[in-house]
Amino acid sequence: MRELVVLGTSSQVASRERNQNGYFLRWDSDGFLFDPGEGTQRQMLYAGVPAGAITRLCVTHFHGDHCLGVPGVIQRLSLDKVQHPVHAHYPESGQEYFTRLRYAASYFERATVLEEPIEEDGLLSVGPFGQLWARRLEHPVDSYGYQLIEPDGRRMLPDRLAQYGVVGPDVGRLQQAGSLVVDGRTVTIDEVSEPRPGQRFAFVMDTRLCEGVFRLADQADLLVIESTYLSSERSLATNFGHLTARQAARVAQECDVRKLVLTHFSQRYTDPAPFHEEAAEEFSGEIVVAADLMRISVPARR
């Protein structure tokens, strides 16, 4: 299963309708928790996301609405005796903040949290999920966005396999070697499969428009991006290092994004409709205005 579970959508402060930030991405056997703000642990309970589902914790920057939920989440990992290691990514310049958050209160540390601070743009990790990248954003404090890239592969076609007599363990051998002799005839993988494009996910939080935003969003199947303001407050967005809904949608359009998720809304707005309306003037694809506890599927492969 590949889906985004929205745990919170408010910028800066929580409201009656919106918790502070929090986003959980289910990606096959991995679970990425992005920017857990205050109250994330409780939102996880409501959403049915157990602490044991988290394999990676990704913090974009150290403003409170993006990280004040870290202490509760990390302590819950130990309370639930989560057996697998959890990798933690965050800006290296905020190491002092992460240490304070990790040890904000006394607890019996059972879980293994592997700290992997980000020093610069680049590839962070490679695993069954594909590649995890970080790109620097433009905000008053050091901030990085995240990009998940699944390598391209091939989809085996059962009717073609049967036609060429490739069965059982021979299927795996063909995938490994690229060709196989069956009944005196060489069968190539191109003859029994078709290209399977890898999927991409991008997570862009607090930032002005910059090169990093576009690099992260490039060809994303699912783009989660802040849209703190409507374009009528564009000057505020620029001054405080944020995006408008129109700017976020323009990024999605230029980067060939398939599904756009707008989030991180200023508490001044109570009606989500104008965000969709403004984005739709720039982006022709699917638009989701995020709400707390919403579940958003990653689009089917291209």
Image (cartoon, rainbow, N blue to C red):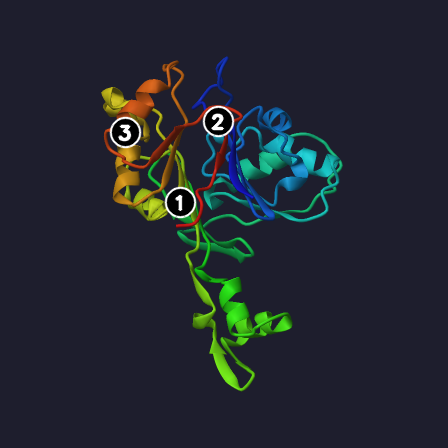
Residue 90: x %, y % from top left: 50, 43
Which numbered dot is residue 221? Answer: 1
Which numbered dot is residue 280? Answer: 3
Instruction: Mark yes or no: residue 43 visible.
Output: yes
Q: Nearer the viewer, mark 2 or mark 1?
A: 1
- Quote the CA–CA distance across marks 2 and 3: 27 Å
Q: Is residue 159 above or below residue 253?
A: below
What crowding class fits label 3: few (fewer than 14 Cα within 10 Å), some (14-19), or many (20 or more)? some
Which quadrant holds residue 243? top left
Residue 246: x %, y % from top left: 26, 29
Comparing 163 with 301, the one in front is 163
> Would residue 280 be found to the left or right of residue 188 on screen?
left
Judged from the image, the secondary structure of the residue bearing numbered disc 1 is loop
Residue of label 2: 65
Of labels 2 and 3, earlier in sequence is 2
What crowding class fits label 2: few (fewer than 14 Cα within 10 Å), some (14-19), or many (20 or more)? many
- Quote the CA–CA distance across marks 1 and 3: 17 Å
